[in-house]
Image (tube, rainbow, N blue to C red):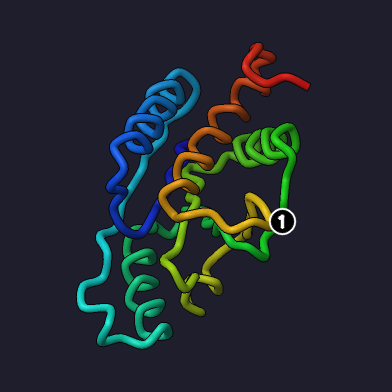
Amino acid sequence: MTVKLIAIGKTDSKALLQLISEYENRLKHYIKFELEIIPDIKNTKNLSEAQQKEKEGELILKNLSNTDVLVLLDENGKQFSSVDFSGYLQKKMNAGLKQLVFVIGGPYGFSTDVYNKAQGKISLSKMTFSHQMVRLFVVEQVYRAFTILRNEPYHHQ
């Protein structure tokens, strides 16, 4: 199984980029992982929130194949402990999925089309985080999940 993370907009923070890269490299020992960055929509001040979500949604959906399982990172999604999230990933792998795709939306969330295509929603917290930080948190939690599945000493209970 491949785990893919799609995010809207670039990250300017070199420190965050470095940490994300570190966890991407660690993940190579467990699974194929891809990070896809969709460039920010241009001239957003001329667009309504709905129009911006629509345009971002089109770009997100263009990056999916028919067999992908789409999971949105959404404030109204299901919350997991790290151990429960590792079990969630194990079930997805056991189901024989080819690609599991997590998506971090733009500042206003997702279009209706993206919500309709999604097969799940996950919330990292009731708190709000910057989209750039969420990338790091997702990559780290996927890494943590695999260390839990392998009974490695990274995660402590």
* Residue 47 lies in quadrant: bottom left
- Where residue 24 appears, x then y in whole percent? 40, 29
Looking at the image, residue 147 lies above or below residue 145: above
Indicate the secondary structure of the residue bearing disc 1. Answer: strand
Is 92 on the left-hand or right-hand side of 45?
right
Residue 34 appears in the figure: yes
x 47%, y 73%: residue: 108
Which residue is rendered at x = 43% and y = 60% of the image? 66
Q: Nearer the viewer, residue 154 or 95?
A: 154
Which residue is rendered at x = 67% and y = 65% of the image? 76
Outermost residue toward the right? 157
Q: Out of 49 and 99, give the one closest to the viewer.
A: 49
Q: Is residue 29 left or right of residue 52?
A: right
Q: Measuring from the top left, give residue 129's x and y in whole percent.
A: 53, 54
Position of residue 19 measured from the top left corner of the image (x, y, whole percent): 40, 30
Q: Residue at x 69, y 35 (%)?
A: 82
Determine crowd level at label 1: few under 14, some 14-19, many 20+ residues with C-alpha closer than 10 A: few
Locate residue 85, reporting x and y percent: 68, 39
* Front position in the image: 14 or 88: 14
Q: What type is the residue that disc 1 sits on?
A: Lys
- Asked whether residue 67 appears in the rendered view, the answer is no
Residue 131 placement: quadrant? bottom left
Query: Is the C terminus in the top left, top right, bottom left or bottom right quadrant?
Result: top right
In the figure, is residue 77 to the left or right of 139? right
Point out the residue furthest to the top here: 153
Residue matched to label 1: 78
Q: Who is closer to the viewer here, 105 or 34?
A: 105
Whether residue 134 is situated above or below residue 106 in the rendered picture? above
